[in-house]
Amino acid sequence: MQIKSRDYFLITLSALFIFTSCKKSNTQGRHIPKNAAFVLHVNGESINSKLPWEEIKKNEAFQSMYADTSLSAYMRSAMDNPENTGIDIKNDFIIFFQKDSAGDYLSVQGVLKDAAKFRQFNNEVHKTTTETEKEGIHFLSNDQMTASWNKDKFILVMNEHGKGIPMNMNDSMPRFSKPFHDRDLNALSSQLFALSEDNSLAKDERFSQLLNTKGDLHFWVNGQTIGEGMVMPGPMSMVNMSKLYEGSLVTGTASFDEGQINADIKSYSGKEMGELWKKYGGEKINNEMVKRIPSKDIALLMALSFKPEGLKEFLKVMGLEGFANMGTNMYGFTLDDLVKGLKGDVVLSVSNISRDSMGKHNFSVLFSPSIADKASFEKLVNAGNKITKEKLGDTAPSFIFHNTSAEYFAIGNNKADVDAYIQGNANNNFPFLDKISGNPLGVYINFQYLMNSMQPSAISDSLSMASYNASVKMWDNLLAYGGKFSDGGISEHIEINLLDKKTNSLKQLNNYLGVMAGIDKMKKSRQVTFEVPIPADSIKTK
């Protein structure tokens, strides 16, 4: 039987699609240790299509740097066109942070377009570097950094001094799992070039899946690597923290779209924590509780759904059940009362922001959990009253009010709102509710309402007012929702909405950061030279 050329083409195309879709390895992770603490992947092609270099050159911060008379001719050439450095800026970039036996280091990796230009660039920038070559890899090094490259790829590595994650929460200065030592950066660069696939992220299916997700940026946070060296203070040292960070991993993709910044995040955990999330994770937020909020002027809202039984099981896994029972018994209730009393729905809101005649801002905070067993929940309320009395004496704070119905408890700083919530007469169908409903977690922040409510006073200086105006013209709101467990992890979506809905958000960020950098420069100049205040309308807000 003969196969027509059209059919042959379709079969070949289908086979290619299946092969690429099922591909479990990747090339971007080839020179990244498989236990890297943090990885950022930058999609150079996508970023450059959304924000061409000519747009960046219009940025006020860029123009300020370019005008610096101390800038060398070569650096000015690189700023004119980054490809003068020999780097292919329209290809992938990798930035990763790692902890090892010698301390912490940072690496930047990318693809070369012209190795000779890259060598010249590094020689011009680092006048004191020493150049060597070994097995086809070139090195330019100083005490703190090594630039290494072959004909196709470059790897920069640099020591990190005291910039890592604090390891002892009681200390004001960061403590690290291992002290910093001088290291052979050339040897480290060679190790990264020669890293085997089995010891890299090239064969990690989750990393491959992440990079195959369409987006401008991808990030990877290894909670286990970060947590393994952490030293907990005081009694917390008795907590089995390894249960929290074993197998912990957060991956995410960010995209700069028209009028929006979108991020999709997936959180993985170890076997025990994963089973807890899978079994006790919530189903969907209680829309009725959200609609009960009496004010339509919402600045912030968080709604959560969970299974209270999971609290007790979590404490068991962490080895804290005994301590928790000792603490609750002191106030007349048990963990079982907590589980029986809570139904598993929670709402928190901040609304009705205003300013009084003295210029002081007022707002209404409301917190409400749903009630399962009223007798058990009453024990929780009594415990709260007892704690308040112990801390503040017989006189309860005049700004805290609470009320209860058969289904809900509400506490807040505005009695009228608390009572109205319990009465349930409001039925506010907030415009954001459609997006967050159906998920175990929903968050909404109204930047416009917050900023307009917190507008600087008439006596504010012109630069502060210019900064405020630039922000008001930029930010609209934030929505976050998700929390469902699937494919071994919990998924969440975050979207930041901008006021300009037609321009891609990367261009808007470029303009906004340029304006803010210009304002900051003027503030510093004013501090030094005591300049006369500049009229707010003289500041450009693109």
Image (tube, helix red, strand yellow):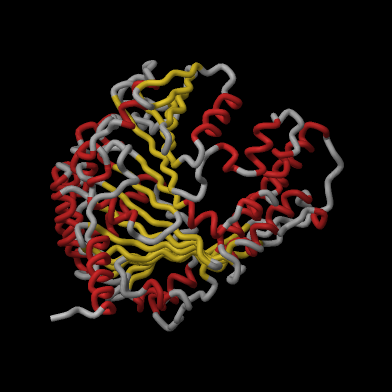
Q: Quadrant of residue 228?
A: top left
Residue 331 in view here? yes
The N terminus, quarter of image: bottom left
Please report the residue visible at 47 percent of the width from the left and 78 percent of the height from the top: 430
Q: How far across and how far down the image is residue 276, in percent?
A: 16, 56
Q: Quadrant of residue 426?
A: bottom left
- Judge by depth and name the residue closer to the eye, 86 or 314: 86
- Relative to 366, residue 70 above or below: above
- Judge by depth and name the residue closer to the eye, 500 or 391: 500
Residue 162 in view here? no
Residue 507 in the figure: left or right of residue 164: right
Please report the residue visible at 42 percent of the width from the left and 59 percent of the height from the top: 215
Please report the residue visible at 22 percent of the width from the left and 54 percent of the height from the top: 24
The C terminus, quarter of image: bottom right
**Residue farthest along the front direction in this orientation:** 2
Q: Quadrant of residue 505?
A: bottom right
Q: How far across and how far down the image is residue 32, in percent?
A: 32, 38
- Relative to 456, residue 330 above or below: above
Q: How far across and how far down the image is residue 91, in percent?
A: 46, 49
Q: How far across and how far down the image is residue 288, in percent?
A: 35, 78
Please report the residue visible at 31 percent of the width from the left and 43 percent of the height from the top: 29
